[in-house]
């Protein structure tokens, strides 16, 4: 019985560690996605501005 408790305890520790790693990875990926979204927004605004300047040049 003592051996089963030891194995279960070890398994729980591994699951806790895996859970922490997954949460950390998830947070990191969310941050990267948010960073990319901000970059896309910035580039879209820049593109719109350049398009407007370009269209005014041809008027």
Image (spheres, helix red, strand yellow):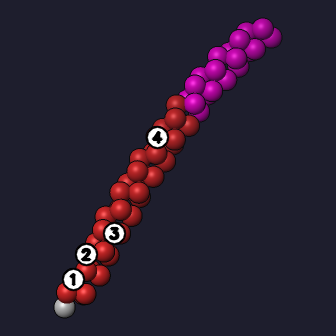
Q: Which of 43/5 is in front? A: 5
Identify the image quadrant of residue 4: bottom left
Sequence-first tag of 2 and 3: 2
Residue 15 is labelled as: 3
- Spatial CA distance of label 4 from label 3 is 24 Å
Looking at marks 4 and 1 on the same chain, the residue that comes earlier in the sequence is marked by 1
- Identify which residue, 2 or 33, lies in the foreground: 2
The crowd level at tag 2 (other Cα within 10 Å; few <14, some 14-19, many 20+) is few
Q: Is residue 43 left or right of residue 2?
A: right
Q: Residue at x 61, y 28 (%)?
A: 44
Residue at left offset 40%, top offset 51%? 24
Judge from the rendering whether residue 14 lies leftward or rightward of residue 8; answer left or right: right
Q: Is residue 38 magenta?
A: no
Say what secondary structure mark 2 lies in: helix
Q: Specify the principal SS of the magenta part.
A: helix
* Residue 31 vertical position relative to residue 26 in the rendered view, above or below: above
Q: Position of residue 39 (x, y in %)?
A: 57, 30
């Amino acid at each position: 019985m003592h051996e089963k408790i030891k194995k279960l305890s070890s398994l729980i520790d591994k699951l806790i560690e895996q859970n922490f790693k997954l949460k950390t990875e998830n947070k990191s990926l969310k941050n990267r996605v948010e960073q990319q979204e901000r970059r896309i927004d910035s580039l879209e605004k820049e593109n719109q501005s350049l398009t407007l300047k370009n269209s005014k040049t041809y008027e």
